[in-house]
Amino acid sequence: MLLWNTSLRELKMEVELHTTAEVKELLSNMEIIKRFPMICYEKDESRLDGKTANEIMDEAKTMEYTGEWMVFTSMGVIVGLACAQIEEKKTRNLYLKEFEVATDAQGNGFSNIMLAYVFKYARNHGCQYITLMAFDDNAFEYWKHQGFTVSPKSTERLRYLFKKV
């Protein structure tokens, strides 16, 4: 089901919402798996050795997530994935569990379109904040650059960030 189309700098992107099982099926191809190293094999290429695509996806921790997966495509090719779950705490928040642009699609502005959609999704579901964790320095800097604030709960290893919707 097509939920949103946008054009930005002549980039056209579509997004569909999927379950974890559906995303696992979409990623059951070694060519696609290699384009999403964080989601599929945590950047550890030794996890690919001698395994089929289905075995790799069976071992991927991200395939245990609950929540809704957003599959972003451009010209029929998957260029980005995000997984989000709505949480009811003191406020209604959207917890962004995963957010990755395919390695061969980076640097083209896709992350900005994806993030705009995530914010629209959060607003449409009555969320007040988007929250996430950044594990590496590049991700941490990216999210700070996008206007996310570091939570006081953060540690050096687990950096929690949030931004008002």
Image (cartoon, rainbow, N blue to C red):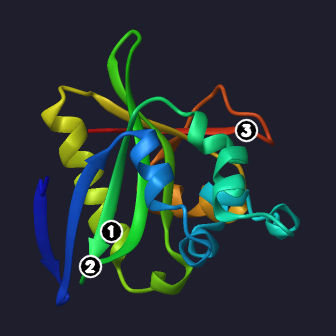
**Residue 133 visible in the shown view:** no
Q: Examine the image and state in which quarter residue 126 appears.
A: top left
- Residue at 51 percent across and 48 percent down: it is 98
As helix, strand or loop, the secondary structure at mark 1 comes to: helix
**Which mark, residue 158?**
3
Q: Within 10 angstroms of label 1, few (less than 14), some, or many (20 or more) residues?
A: few
Give the labeled residue for mark 1: 112
Pick the quarter of the image with the C terminus. top left
Residue 16 appears left or right of 25: left
**Nearest to N terminus: mark 3 or mark 2:** 2
Real-space Cα separation, disc 3 to disc 2, in angstroms = 35 Å
Amino acid on which the number 2 mark rests in the picture: Gly
Q: Residue at x 57, y 32 (%)?
A: 151
Dot 3 lies on which element?
Answer: loop
Q: Is residue 165 above or below residue 35?
A: above
Position above or below: 76 against 99: below
Residue toward you, 162 or 56: 56
Q: Which residue is mark 2?
A: 76
Q: Is label 2 or label 1 in front?
A: 2
Instruction: Give the residue type that dot 1 points to.
Output: Asn
